[in-house]
Amino acid sequence: MKLYYSDASPYARGVRVAIRYLDITGIIEQAINPLENDEAFVEANPLAKIPCLVLSDGSAVFDSEVILRYLDSEYGDDKLFGSLPSWQQQTEFSLIKGLLDSAVGLRQEQMREDEGVRSPFWTARFEQALLRGLRHLTHHGEFHTQQVNANTILLACLLSYLDFRHPDLAWQKVAPGLANWHSSFITLPAMMSTQP
Ligand SMILES: N[C@@H](CCC(=O)N[C@@H](CS)C(=O)NCC(=O)O)C(=O)O
């Protein structure tokens, strides 16, 4: 199997953390820049987005959520999603995934600055969603332990991405509990070995 990824992508990092945590072997990780539209990559995922997992029979699995569910079901004994049976926990997963979309959207606005087309409206909207969402998770989430599951992996990758790409956001001020949890979670070997 082959995983297309980039070091900076928080979605791809979530999948790479899961591969290490579940101790899955036999996946070759190929770093690419999705914006370069490599022919084999675009053939595998017409959306030209990473992560994208190409199976041994040549078929492709994407996006990050489907890859995580695939790996968990085929190799992980449901360790990642099995511990999240309630609709509330599934909704928490959607919230974290949506916050990743906001963080990456905010990054795209930064990149548009060079073209002189950065939107103050969308910049503020992404920032507000991030701060609202993290505040919500601080009050309603269950992120007080070292438990490793799909939600904690993705949340840790999101918070590390915010520190990496959006250090001025100061998310720690609205979510101090998450900041404590994150500083401990990132010491896990699977997190350490996938740092951008
Ligand atoms: N919903 C997708 C989002 C993946 C995504 O947006 N990846 C970014 C990198 S962080 C990408 O490949 N961007 C290239 C593009 O948008 O053309 C997932 O969960 O995998």
Image (cartoon, helix red, strand yellow):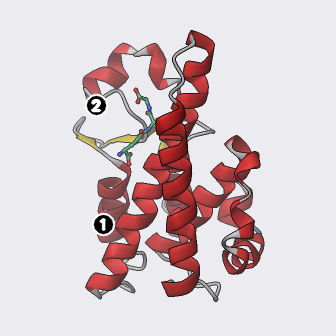
Disc on res. 103: none
| Residue 92, placed above or below residue 99 | below
The image position of residue 6, as x and y in percent, is 56, 35
Q: Is residue 171 left or right of residue 117?
A: right
How many numbered marks does the figure carry?
2
Q: Quadrant of the C terminus?
A: top right
Residue 31 appears in the figure:
no
Label 2 Cα neighbours within 10 Å, binned few <14 / some 14-19 / many ≥20: many
Which residue is drawn at the image coordinates 25% and 26% (left, top)? Answer: 46
Query: Residue at the top extreme?
Result: 115
The image position of residue 38, as x and y in percent, is 41, 16
Q: Nearer the viewer, residue 115 or 154?
A: 115
Secondary element under disc 1, as helix, strand or loop, is helix
Label 1 Cα neighbours within 10 Å, binned few <14 / some 14-19 / many ≥20: few
Which residue is drawn at the image coordinates 48% and 52% (left, top)? Answer: 100
- Residue topped by disc 1: 74
- Residue topped by disc 2: 45
Q: Quadrant of the N terminus?
A: top left
Residue 154 appears in the figure:
yes
| Residue 133, placed above or below residue 79 | above
Q: Nearer the viewer, mark 1 or mark 2?
A: 2
The image position of residue 58, as x and y in percent, is 25, 35
Which residue is drawn at the image coordinates 54% and 23% (left, top)? Answer: 118
Secondary element under disc 2, as helix, strand or loop, is loop
Residue type, mark 1 in image: Glu
Q: Mark 1 and mark 2: span between their CA atoms?
A: 21 Å
Mark 1 near mark 2, Cβ–Cβ under 8 Å? no
Q: Earlier in the sequence, mark 1 or mark 2?
A: 2
Query: Residue at the front extreme?
Result: 121
Q: Is residue 184 left or right of residue 87?
A: right
